[in-house]
Amino acid sequence: MQDALMTISNISLSHNGKNILDDVSFKLHQGEFITLIGPNGAGKSSLIKILLGVIKQDSGNITSNADIRLGYTPQIFTANPYIPISVKDFLTLNQKLDNLFMQQTFDLTGINELLRLPLKNLSGGELQKVLLTRALLNKPNVLILDEPAQNLDVDSQMQLYKLIQDIHQQQNCAVLMVSHDLHRVMKESSQVICLYHHICCEGLPESILKDAKFNDLFADQINELMATYEHHHNHHHEH
C-alpha cells in the first residue's frame, strides 16, 4: 500500500488526571474513508484537535506526508449575528482563489444560490454545506469532518451525507469523519474505528457489527442499526 497521508502512533492525552486518549494508533491513506465513532466523552473531538495541531498530545507522534493539505469542518460553528458578512465573502476571506476552481467547488456543493445571503441567515443544513465548501477551497487531500450532521433534520442529514460521499468519490481525498449516526457509518466507510479513550475495535463496517465490544458500547442503538442496515442492503429506493 502507498505511504499513509497521516500516521497516528501511540497518542495519549490526559486532563486533570483523567485519561482522555490512551495509546491510539491508526493510519489514513489516500482515498480512504474512516469513520470515528464512540459514545459522548470518548475522546473523539480531542483526537481531532490533536490532528489539527490545536492541542498537543502528552505522548505519541503524528507523522504527515510532506504534501498533506487538510480541510476541516468544526462540530460547532456560529456566525456572529453582529457582523453582516455574506456567504461569498466568508468563503473568500484571507484566500487567493482561482475563479474557475472556486466556481467548480460552488457547483459541486450546490451553494450558488446562497452566495449573496448573509452568513447569519443560513439554516443548519445550508451552513454545513458552506463550511464544507470552505474546507474544499483548501484543495485538501485529507478532509476532517467533526460530526457534520449534528443538529440537522433527517432530510438535511441525508443530503449532507450524500454530498460528502460524492466529494469523496470525485476528489479521491481521504476522509476522517466523526459521527454518531451508526447506520450512516455503515454505508460509505472503508474502515470504522470505535473509540472509547482507546481503540476498542476497528475494521470493515460488517465486521465491526459483529464485535462484542462494539455491541456493548452501542447496545441501545444496535437493534435499530441492524434493521436499517438490512433494509439498505436488501433494496434501493428510487428518488
Image (cartoon, grey):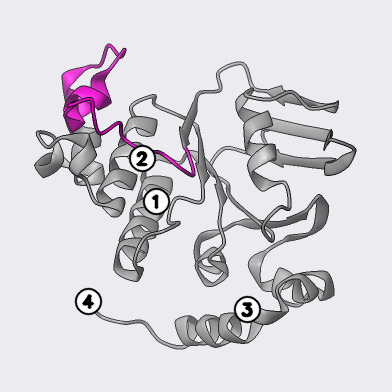
Residue carrying label 2:
132
Q: Earlier in the sequence, mark 3 or mark 4?
A: 3
Q: Residues within 10 Å of mark 1 (few under 14, many from 20)?
A: many
Mark number for residue 221? 3
Residue ID at (39%, 32%)? 135
The amino acid at mark 2 is Leu
Q: Amino acid at mark 3?
A: Gln
**CA distance for labels 3 and 1:** 23 Å
- Given residues 108 and 73, the one toward you in this image is 73
Q: Is residue 50 magenta?
A: no
Quarter of the picture containing the N terminus is top right
First along the sequence among labels 3 and 1: 1
Pointer 4: what residue? 239
Local SS, label 1: helix
Q: Are marks 2 and 4 in contact (CB under 8 Å)?
A: no
Distance of label 2 from label 4 (alpha carbons): 24 Å
Which residue is painted at 23% across and 38% down in the image? 120
Q: Position of residue 118 (x, y in %)?
A: 15, 35
Closer to the chain start, of discs 2 and 3, is 2
What span is in magenta? 74-103
Name which residue lies at 39% across and 51% down.
Answer: 164
Between marks 3 and 4 in the image, the one whose residue lies nearer the viewer: 3
For badge 4, the amino acid type reads His
Give the alpha-carbon distance from disc 2 to disc 3, as whole Å: 28 Å
Q: How far apart are labels 4 and 1 at the CA level?
A: 18 Å
Q: Quadrant of residue 224?
A: bottom right
Q: Is residue 5 visible?
A: no
Q: Which residue is mark 1?
A: 164
Query: Mark 4–mark 1 contact, CB under 8 Å?
Result: no
